[in-house]
Image (spheres, rainbow, N blue to C red):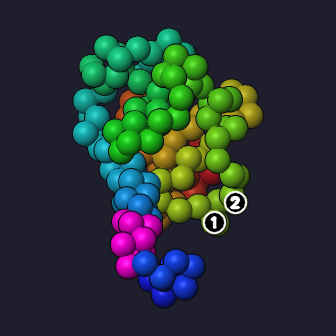
Amino acid sequence: MRRAVFAYNRADWYVEEVLGFADQYVKGYVAVGDVGNKWIGDSVYVFGRGRNQSDLVRGRFDCSSLVHWAFKEVGVNLGPLTSIITETLRHLGTPVSPSEMKLGDIAFFDTYKRDGHVGIYVGNGKFIGAQSSTEVAIADMTKGYWE
């Protein structure tokens, strides 16, 4: 990677800066799945939009507000909290197949509607999300309801 960036621009400061940004980007997306761990066993699931900052501070989430909060915690702004729903999240980024998912990717599930639920991929076929049955929890997306 270092040689490729250096071939593009032969300034050492430039190489360091680009690799620093890349490292922050990777760490941010890996960490986004971890930040929600603080709410496991200490959250409340509240269905539907309308979360505000006070709700998030108290651990009151629906699935999309948890995703919004987690990304904000690692410095990624997904837009205004009041406009975040699964439908708006679905239009961010580039879709990939489940076999191509990487840590920190957003995973969508068909529930009461197409892409009606969302969570953050944490690896090994698991995601962290806010569900009505478990509040914030890590769930297995390879079997049962989430498959």
Q: Nearer the viewer, residue 39 or 57?
A: 57
Point out the residue furthest to the front here. Answer: 11
Rendered residue at 59%/25% (across/down)? 85
Q: Is residue 78 left or right of residue 35?
A: right
Q: Mark 1 highlights which residue?
A: 100
Rendered residue at 59%/47% (across/down)? 107
Q: Is residue 132 visible?
A: no
Asked whether the residues under the numbered discs 1 and 2 touch, taking CB atoms below 8 Å apart as contact, a structural biologist would say yes
Q: Residues within 10 Å of mark 1 (few under 14, many from 20)?
A: few
Q: Mark 2 highlights which residue?
A: 97
Give the secondary structure at mark 2: loop
Q: Is residue 97 above or below residue 119?
A: below
Rendered residue at 40%/32% (across/down)? 69
- Give the residues drawn in magenta, as a range: 12-20
Residue 4 occupies quadrant? bottom right
- Is 111 magenta? The answer is no
Q: Is residue 108 visible?
A: yes
The image position of residue 67, as x and y in percent, is 47, 36
Spatial separation of the CA atoms under disc 1 and disc 2 = 5 Å
